[in-house]
Image: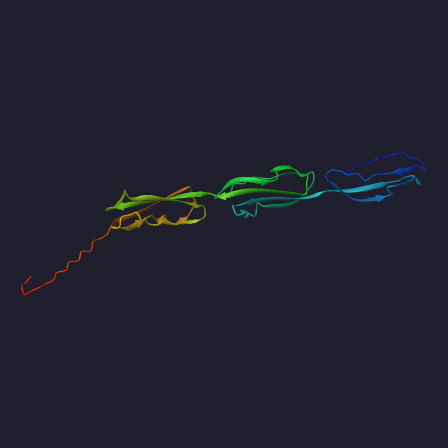
């Protein structure tokens, strides 16, 4: 910035100059002739030097625990007062955007520190486990109520048999995806049960001498 004041004076005149304050700038130093005095030469030059103020700009993308989701998107930059800045809301696989906190998403630098935080949470999916009868083949006859549970994306979900299945039935087979990494809004798992084999034991006891 160049704010030059030219004034015509005579030898013997007094003069003075002032260190001004400018928005976005810090005073650095004064060079040349004294800030004030008496004119005793043909040219008196007083120079005030300023530099643009520096500021820190931080943009983060964090999960529910405050951890960075993608370090390549994080920004930590040195900028100057008066600079314009922008930030961006990204879409991340397995995450839903929640909100933004801190400073405005875009604007003009007018203070020393800016922090913009984009908050995300893991998506959730539902695992529905069906408990069906197996009777010489797969059926959709329910032996117990469906069990439903939510899991976060990237978690390894598990399923299990139901305690509501009658005691005379045993697990015969189940879907291959009875356990896996959650990666979709909904997963259905089938458990099939069949009647247990009966074990009949007959005991005969002989008393007396007659043949049975």
Where residue 137 appears, x then y in whole percent? 25, 46
> For the C terminus, which image quadrant?
bottom left
Q: Classify residue 187 as left or right of residue 95.
A: left
State the residue lying farthest toward the top.
8
Q: Is residue 179 left or right of residue 208?
A: right
Q: Quadrant of residue 211?
A: bottom left
Quadrant of the image for the N terminus?
A: top right
Q: Residue furthest front?
A: 208
Q: Position of residue 183 (x, y in %)?
A: 43, 45
Give the left or right position of residue 140, taking residue 115 as reference. Answer: left
| Number of numbered discs overlaid on the protein picture | 0
Left/right of residue 91 with respect to residue 86 in the rendered view? left
Residue sitting at the far left: 210
Residue 203, image x and y in percent? Answer: 14, 60
Q: Furthest-right residue in view?
A: 12
Quadrant housing residue 49: top right
Q: How is the image coloured?
A: rainbow
Q: Residue at x 54, y 39 (%)?
A: 99
Q: Position of residue 11 (x, y in %)?
A: 94, 37
Residue at 56% over, 39% down: 100
Q: Nearer the viewer, residue 160 or 179?
A: 160
């Amino acid at each position: 910035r160049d704010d030059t004041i030219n004034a015509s004076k005579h030898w013997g005149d007094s003069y003075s100059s002032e260190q001004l304050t400018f928005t976005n700038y810090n005073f650095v130093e004064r060079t040349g002739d004294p800030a004030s005095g008496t004119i005793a030469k043909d040219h008196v030059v007083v120079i005030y030097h300023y530099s643009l103020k520096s500021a820190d700009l931080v943009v983060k993308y964090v999960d529910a625990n405050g951890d960075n989701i993608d370090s390549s998107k994080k920004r930590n930059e040195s900028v100057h007062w008066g600079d314009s800045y922008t930030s961006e809301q990204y879409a991340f696989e397995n995450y839903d955007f929640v909100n933004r906190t801190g400073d405005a998403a875009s604007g003009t630098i007018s203070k020393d520190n800016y922090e913009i935080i984009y908050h995300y949470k893991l998506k959730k999916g539902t695992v529905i486990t069906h408990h069906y009868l197996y009777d010489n083949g797969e059926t959709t006859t329910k032996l117990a109520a469906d069990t439903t549970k939510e899991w976060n994306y990237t978690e390894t979900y598990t399923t299990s048999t139901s305690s509501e299945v009658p005691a005379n039935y045993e697990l015969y087979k189940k879907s291959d995806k009875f356990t896996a990494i959650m990666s979709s809004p909904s997963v259905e798992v089938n458990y099939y049960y069949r009647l247990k084999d009966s074990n009949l034991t007959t005991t005969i006891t002989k008393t007396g001498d007659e043949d049975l």
